Image (spheres, rainbow, N blue to C red):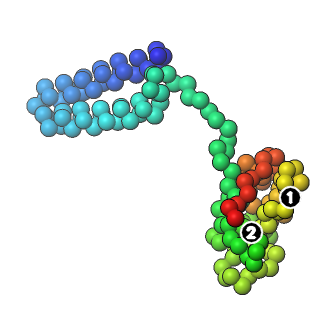
Amino acid sequence: MDYLFWFYVFLSFVITTGGTFYFFNQGKQILAGMYFVGLLATLIYFGLQWFTVSGSTTATVGPWPPVINYCPDFMTLYTVGTEKVCLDTTGMAQTGGISKWSDPTQTDERYLFHLFLNTTGNDRVTKLCQQAKDKKVTWEGVWDGLVCMGNEPPLPPS
């Protein structure tokens, strides 16, 4: 356990008991009870946020992003004909990028983000990054708006 954890426990005890004692001596028993319960809940919440179960502050950090989506950020997976594509149903793309899709009859290229399911590996990643750049969308773990990360997104379910 870290010394920081023990310092947190000690400081929490002093502040909680000291404040409760102060309000209780002022004749404000209800306020003392509310202070005790509220501060105790707050200190437990932050203690769980800042410290692990063993009492240390070091947390293991995994790879980022933990999961790569099938589609670029804020886009929706959809099937047009027999091809799985991603569509911008919210209108989040930058001006001049992919157009907002709102009608199933809109199958023009300006509405579709192709997933290149017939290729794999670096070829697929290169094509996806170039298309994301052209359509002005970001994709966490694949294309950040400036650099191709080189991660291949998973294939959508069939």
* Above or below 42: residue 4: above
Give percent across and percent down for residue 128: 82, 58
Relative height, residue 87 to residue 102 (above, below) = above
Amino acid bearing label 2: Val
Image quadrant assignment for residue 157: bottom right
In front of the other: 53 or 23: 53
Pair 2/1: label in front: 1
The local crowd at label 1, few if under 14, some if 14 to 19, many if 20 or more residues have their Cα within 10 Å, is few
Side of 15 relative to 97 (left or right)? left
Q: Is residue 131 visible?
A: no
The residue positioned farthest toward the right in the image shown:
123
Q: Residue at x 74, y 53 (%)?
A: 153
Disc number for residue 119: 1
One can see residue 32 in this view: yes
The amino acid on which the numbered mark 1 sits, given as a three-letter code, is Thr
Image coordinates for residue 26, horizontal then vertical, percent: 13, 29
Q: Nearer the viewer, residue 83 or 69?
A: 83
Q: Residue at x 80, y 70 (%)?
A: 96
User: In the displayed structure, would residue 14 be above or below residue 116?
Assistant: above
Q: Secondary structure at mark 1?
A: loop
Q: Residue at x 85, y 50 (%)?
A: 121
Quadrant (top left/top right/bottom left/bottom right) for the C terminus: bottom right
Q: Identify the residue under disc 2.
A: 85
